[in-house]
Structure formats: structure tokens, C-alpha cells
Amino acid sequence: MKKLAPIFSIVLVLTVLLSACTPTAQPTATQAPVEEVTLVVWDQFYRDVESQVMDTLNAEFEAAHPGVKIERVVKTLDDLKVTLKLALSESNGPDVAQVNQGRSDMGAMVQADLLLPLNDYAAKYKWGERFSSSVASRNSFTPDGKTFGEGNLYGVSPTAEVVGVYYNKGIFEANGWTVPTTFDEFEKLLADIKAKGITPISFGSLDGWNAIHEWSAVQHLLVSLDYINNFVYGVNNATFDTPENQQAAAIMQDWVEKGYFSEGFPGVGYDDSNKLFKAGEGAMTITGSWLAGELINDTDQKFGFFLLPGNPGQTRLAIGGVGIPFAIRKTTTHADLAAEYLDWMVSPRAAQLWAEAGMMPAMSIPDGTNVEAGSLFADTLTAWDTINKENAVGHYIDWATPTFYDTIVAELQKVFGGETDPAAFTAAVQADYAKFLSENK
Amino acid sequence: MNDPLRQPGESRFHGWLYLLPGMAIYLVFIFYPILETIRTSFYKWDGFSNNRTFIGLENYASLLVDGQFLKALLNNVTFIIFYSIIPILLGLVLASLLGRKPLPGLTFFRAGLFLPQILSMVVVGVTWRWVFNPTFGPLNMGLRAVGLDAMAKSWLGDFTWALPAVGSVGTWVQYGFCMVLFLAGMQRIPNDYYEAAELDGASEFRQLLHITLPSLRPELGVALITTIIAALRVFDLVYVTTRGGPGDSTLVTGFLVYRAAFQQNRIGYATAVATIMTLVIFIISLVILRFQSREEQT
């Protein structure tokens, strides 16, 4: 034992030394002179075109605010999600950052008191005139972070998204098919395409998440807006175990059985299935408006976009919403400047730049913006405009609980693989949902 | 240090001083995080906010009845077959083929078969995802080309085949390592043994069983430990190929930890899983080491 004593003393000294080292902070570092302000912004617009839009907007903001410098940090969404929470709890973290919506990101950060409520700024800059209340509620939480969809506003989104059906115009024209206007027509079309030996719906569920869109796009036609809102925001005793949700699952299994999806779809990734679709394999694919930019370049095929149609008497909801919002760190020393930056991110000029880059802005597009009529992008804009006007903007249902995404992806893969039946599917997902609601009280 | 020329046999304290840098790094970057991980597993915590509640063993208790965790653990055990047992058998066969007699182009084969081991797992995963692609992957295209259309499957998306498919990628990565390890060990075995055995009329297989295998005991131990550890902590391959799907058929504990910690804000749960896995790996390694050293003494 005596021989070991020196080791212990070394360990002890080290521990003391280390614990003395770690908390050393530099409190003076952030106090730059008033004229020279650096605003640190974290965003996830890493793809070429998006990144250029951000650079242009930042440069124009700097030009309009002498002395202000934007320090831009670009990350992929995955990377951003993993690092942002800790960064925001630092006193020298980003002043402005894109914060993913939903409970596990924005909700958890509000709960940890990391984000600045934007209600005053919303009034000052009249954001209410730019966005509908349904859009604002997606970026809202009660101050305790527990109730989603109401309470304080914590972010503003520059872009919008809608999930619908892309179709190959060449294949449609060659066979005399037209865009269907009811769900019955859509299913008839699927049968016709299959009969011609063409894949009706290009699809690959290996990555998981787009299986949600496939199923939920049909689910949205069967349920009401109130149901979807209640469900995602976890209010009014919403449940997943409903006949409509089972019916949507049954429709998926029916389509699998009839061979409407790509052959071997469970083993194909999202990007691979889109590459095949882009190369002319398959007549249609169900996914979000974000793919439009991808389908315009480097292809000899022509594509169009329409909303999945409902039958008469059915609602005509579509999965959709606004992109990842910009939020402000609660402890920033430049709150006013940061808010001005947020306002610039959702300005008409930003809308124009996003639209010209082929990305759908959440704000209305100012006159004089260059959008080609009859183009794929014009189709997606029309779709967004339609559901916006009809108040039919649905939800990404995986926002409902922090574990919902993983649960429903696993269960939907079982649905598509014929490993479960619709009733067992809704029961399994409801178990996850009910557990969360009871713990969240 | 004003007394640099101490005589050997004096204070051992001096010796410990040389260990200080290494030990400091070990303590800060390995020992402290492990302790902190174990401590966190007794809490309910989202990973960044201040509301951290001590809940004792609750995380562990819930794991025992957590179907997902048990399924993941079972998948890890299945991975041992693919990551450890098959590669070791393959490595043995290949080593005895390549090692005994000088073959033309031996270096080429040795390097070629070892190649998968030096590739990054992400590269391996992406490559195999392409190989397994049901539409344009070479595996299915090859099967169809020789008329085996019925065997062409949606490999990574099939509830029966996804686990063996991902597992076989592990086999592909690990067997080269085992082979090189065994080849090195076989250099140590005097050729006289084999000559004597041959004179006595022992077949190649008998020679493998009675000369090669017993002589390779230390290498077998190393191969077992490293490959079993690899099987129990597999993450990257599953992350890149299937993300645990379809359903939970390829879910492994490593992926469960990642998902709980970084996507679901359940740090307590994640660290509990990590702690259990560390313990399991530790015990298995200990058992193999004990077993090996006892055999060496006899």
C-alpha cells in the first residue's frame, strides 16, 4: 500500500490542478467597442444555391449597418442539431441560430431557457402581417417549453415546404394521362400506370423518414385540420389510435401489394430513389417541395408537381409548414441587432432571393421576382399558395413527441413490410404518444 | 530537477514522474469521462439544461423491461457470429492456405485480403449500401445475370435479410485482420513440426488441428477480444446502412445510445445503456484473458 501512495498524491494534485483550470473564462472578450459589432450566426443552408442566398443577404445587411460584421457558421442540419444546444448555453455562443422546430429541439431549448421570446419584436416589425397565425404557432411554445403551438414566439422561418406529388411530364404525355383531381382518380391512375409496366410511385424507405411522408400524405386527406393540430400540439386528448390512421396504413399496404411502389423499395435510400426518378424511372414520387431544385438541373426529363387530391367531401390537407426558423440566444448582448437581422431574413428582399434560387419562401413574393410560368417551381408555389389560402397546411407529425420519429419510422417500416397490421400499427404508435403525454404533464 | 543522476533502486517516485504525462492524458480523456458517464446514468437529464434529477437505478430498471434495448442487445450478440466467429474461421483457413507454402504473389493476396480492414467504416458502409441496392446494386444484378432472379432481394430493407446483410459486411471487414494476425503467428511455428507430422502420416487438416491451432493460442485470444468488442460496439456501419431498420431488425445498442443522447435528449437512458455495454465488454475481455492465461500455464 505504501508504494501506491505517490500515485495517489499525483492523482490528487492533478485533479486539483485540472479543476482549477477548467472554469477559467475571459469575461472581457465579448465587450467590443459599440461601433464594431460582430453578430455570430449559425445556419444550415450548406447547399450551394442556398448558401449563396445567405451570403448575399448577409453582405447586404452588413452594407446597411456600418460597423456590423456577420460571422457566419454553416453546418448541416444533423451537425447543427447535435452541437447547438450546448453552444447556446455558452455566454459566447451564437447570437442568432437556426433552431429546428418541435419538442426535442426548440421545445427542449425553451425549457432550458436558452431562447429569447420574440413577441415584442414581432409587434415592432409587424411579423403578424407577413405570416399567418398557423405559421407562427409552429415556432411557439409556452415559456415552460411544455405546450407546443401557443405561448411565446421563439423563431421566424424564411422558407416554406409542402409535400405533394411530382410527376414525369414525358411519361404522362406519352400515355395520355392527366393530373388527377380526386383520390379515386389518383388510385385509378396508379392502376393504369402499373398496367403499362411502369413503376407508379418511385419510393425508397431505407432511410426511414420519407416513409412518414408517404403514409402521412394520405392520412392528411382523411383527417381534419383540428385533429392534426391537436395531435401535434398534444392537446384535447388527441389519440393516434383512430380509424382514419388505420385506413391510411391499409391503403399503404394495398399499394405495396399491388406493386405501386418501386421494386425493392425497402432497401432503397431516399436519394437513390430520387436519382432513379430523375432519370425517368417511375411516373410519380411523393415528397416535399424541397426536391424541386434538384429535379430541374442535369436532366432531360420534365417534371410537374400537384397536391395529392382528396375525394369530394374530404378535407384537402397537405403536409407542409415552414422551414427551420431563426432564433436568438437568450443571453446575447446584441438582442436588438439580432432581431433586426431576423427581420431582414424574412424581408421581401429575402423572399425574392429565395424564390429566384428555386426555394419556396414563407413570405409572399414581391412583384418583379423572376419565376418562370409553367415551371416546376411555379407548380410548387401554386401548391403552397393553395393550401395557405384554404387554410389546409398540415404538419410533420413526427414533431409530436421527442421519440415519435423513431417510433413511427420503425412501425411504418413494419407496415410497408407487411410485418404488422393497421390496428397493431396505430396501437404501437399510440403507446409512445400516450407515454409522452402522461410524462409531460 | 537539480538531481538528475539518481542511482537505480532509489525512490520509485522518480519513475512515476515519467508516467505523469501519459497518466494525465488517460485520466482527463478516458478515466474522468467514464466516471462522469456512470454518474450521469443515475440521473434523468436532457443533456444541457439545469434540471437534472437523481433517480438512482431507475434507468437501469427500465432497461430490463425495455423491448427495444433487449432486441438491440440480441442483435449485438448475433453480430458476434458475423464479426468474430466467421472471420476467425475464415482467417484460419486463409492463413493456412497462404502461410504454409510459398505461393507466387503471396504479398499481393495478403495485402488484397487485408484491404477492407484499413478502410473507414463509413466508406465501407456507403459502398455496401450500393452493392446491396435492389435496383442497380451489383449483387442483385449478378444474381439476375446468372438466372437466380428469385434470390435477388431488397437486402437492407428485408426483415429477414437485413441483419445478415449488415453482418456480412462486418465479416468482410474483419477476416483480413484475423488472417494477417494468424499469418504472423504461424511464422513462429518451426517447420520441423509439420515435417514430423507429415512423416507420421498426418493429413493437412490434422496438422491444422494439432499443430497450427494450439500454437496460435495467443493470436486467437487477441482476435477474439478485438472482434467481439467490435461486434458489441458496432455503430457506424448500422448508422450508414440501415439506421436500425427495417423496424428494429438491425438496431444495435451503439445506435440506441446515439439516438437517445443526441436526438431524443435522454442522456440518462443513453449513458445507462453505454455503461452496461462497457461492463459487458469488460467482463467478456476479462474472461477471455483469464481463459487464455490459464491455458498457457498448463
Image (cartoon, rainbow, N blue to C red):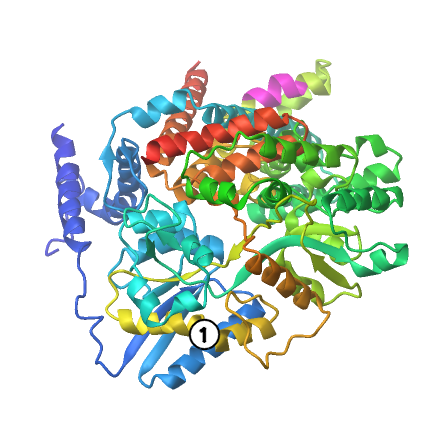
How many residues crowd mark 1 within 10 Å: few (<14), some (14–19), many (20+)?
some
The tally of labels here is 1
Task: State the extent of the magenta-drawn residues as a range.
Answer: B207-214
Residue drawn at x 73%, y 33% as measured from the top left: A254
The residue that label 1 is drawn on is A347
Q: Which quadrant holds the C terminus of chain A? A: top left
Of residues A160 and B251, the one nearer the viewer is A160
Question: Image check: B10 left or right of A284?
Answer: left
- B270 sits left or right of A209 in the view: left
**Residue A213 in view:** yes
Above or below — where is A357 with respect to A149?
A: below
Q: Quadrant of residue A43?
A: bottom left
Q: Residue at x 48, y 27 (%)?
A: B68
Eyeballing the image, is A32 above or below A141? below
Q: Which of B122 and A25 is in front in this view?
A: A25
Q: Which residue lies furthest to the front in this view?
A: A313
B35 or A344, which is in the foreground? A344
- Measured from the top left, where is residue A406 in percent x and y? 50, 38
Magenta stretch: dominant SS?
helix
Element type at marker 1? loop
* Residue B278 picture location, percent across and down: 38, 31
